[in-house]
Amino acid sequence: MSENEVLYFILGIISMLVLWFGFMMLCVIFEKDTTRGFDEWLNMYESMDSEIPNKHSPNILLGGDSAYCFITGNFIGADVIDNGDAKYTKEFDSWVSKEGQKILHERNDNEAKIILEEWENNDERNI
């Protein structure tokens, strides 16, 4: 083997090691980022399960201070949520306005029964 062939062989080995090391680093970074993201998601999900969202809940409200009624589709302002006129349903992950609550009491379908039973159970626990 000539000097050039040995040099190319060594450079080939070094370049393969660099590529392998770079690939392994990307795998470690990606795995760490994915695991961290999943843990954060899991903690968020568990904390959401234990508390009723307020006006700052990003998944339910618009811009952090308003929402749409699940029943009527009408806009609910932050003041309505803050003063307790709108009710939250955990079952459907939504807010219901006063008008929507009246409609629910008049309806006799499964959806209305589920929401009203949920609110009754919550009221009984709070007594």
Image: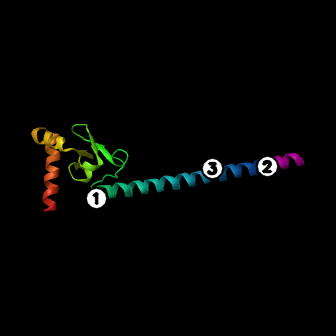
Image position, residue 96 (x, y; %): 22, 44
Query: What range of the chain is rendered magenta?
Result: 1-9
Mark 3 belongs to which amino acid?
Answer: Phe
Q: Nearer the viewer, residue 81 or 57?
A: 81
**Is 6 covered by the magenta stretch?**
yes
Q: Which residue is mark 2?
A: 11
Q: Residue at x 75, y 52 (%)?
A: 14
Earlier along the polypeptide chain: callout 1 or callout 2?
2
Position of residue 25 measured from the top left corner of the image (x, y, whole percent): 61, 54
Extreme residue toward the bottom, this view:
127
Asked which secondary structure carries label 2, the reply is helix
Asked whether the residues under the numbered discs 1 and 3 touch, taking CB atoms below 8 Å apart as contact, a structural biologist would say: no
- 124 versus 94 height, above or below: below
Mark before the other along the chain sequence, 1 or 3: 3
Front residue (pair 35, 79): 79
In-front residue for pair 14/94:
94
Q: Residue 73 — which label?
A: none
Residue 1 visible at all? no
Residue tagged by mark 3?
23
List x then y, in percent, for residue 67.
30, 44
**Label 1, on which residue?**
50
Q: Residues within 10 Å of mark 2 (few under 14, many from 20)?
A: few
N-terminal label among 3 and 2: 2
Q: Label 1, secondary structure: give it.
A: helix
At a point 35% along the width and 47% down the height, the residue shown is 59
At label 3, counting other C-alpha atoms closer than 10 Å, the crowd grade (few under 14, some 14-19, many 20 or more) is few
The location of residue 82, given as percent across then percent down, is 26, 53
Give me the residue at 11% from left, 42% from top: 105
